[in-house]
Amino acid sequence: MHQKFMEEAIKEAEISSKEGGLPIGAVLVKENQIISRGHNRLIQKDSSILHAEMDAIENAGRLNHEDYQKCTLYTTLSPCPMCSGAVILYNIPRVVIGDNQTLMGAEKLLKDNGVEIIVLNDDKCKELFEDFVNNNPGIWENELAKVGNTTELKE
């Protein structure tokens, strides 16, 4: 089941890539149904907050507390502190991560706040992100500089 939803998050990452953005995608799933989708739009919208996870949460609209508690967020890349904070704020109990080997986000923050983390180590997620970084090192370095490098890029 997890791989099915990760494939949908990958589709979102590919949309972002085709738009010239960072290839990161997310879907929000409630009771085994995708209720929203999102992809990174930092570059496309000249935004400081439109990460894939934030985009997916925003696109779900205003859910009630009980709905958020029935959700799982699927993301192609380990979520940053901002996105992890949104997960915690809305009491989303589970995050499924496609890749955390290329970049480690704020998984400890999530775990420390009772969020279940499932890491798939999906090769496609890893390839999408690594290809972007290798082909666009200046763009990625610029994005890291903006946030004070709060995530760890792994070699």
Image (cartoon, helix red, strand yellow):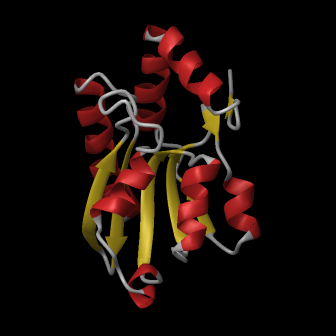
Residue occupying the point 51% across, 74% down: 90
Asked if residue 58 is positioned above or below residue 81 in the image, the reply reads below
Asked if residue 96 is positioned above or below residue 35 in the image, the reply reads above
Q: Quadrant of the C terminus?
A: top right
Would residue 2 appear left or right of 147 to someone viewing this image?
left
Task: Find residue 71 and report its horizontal and vertical position in percent.
Answer: 42, 75
Taking depth in this image into account, of 65 and 114 the one nearest to the observer is: 65
Task: Find residue 153 and report its horizontal and vertical position in percent.
Answer: 66, 28
Residue extending furthest toward the bottom = 66
Asked if residue 103 is positioned above or below residue 35 in the image, the reply reads above
Task: Find residue 59 and report its horizontal and vertical position in percent.
Answer: 28, 61
Residue occupying the point 34% across, 37% down: 41
Taking depth in this image into account, of 5 and 13 the one nearest to the observer is: 13
Task: Find residue 102 and report its horizontal and vertical position in percent.
Answer: 60, 31
Residue occupying the point 53% across, 70% down: 94
Q: Quadrant of the N terminus?
A: bottom left
Would residue 2 appear left or right of 87 to someone viewing this image?
left
Asked if residue 11 is positioned above or below residue 128 in the image, the reply reads below
Taking depth in this image into account, of 12 and 1 the one nearest to the observer is: 12
| Number of marks in the rendered image | 0
Would residue 134 appear left or right of 85 to someone viewing this image?
left
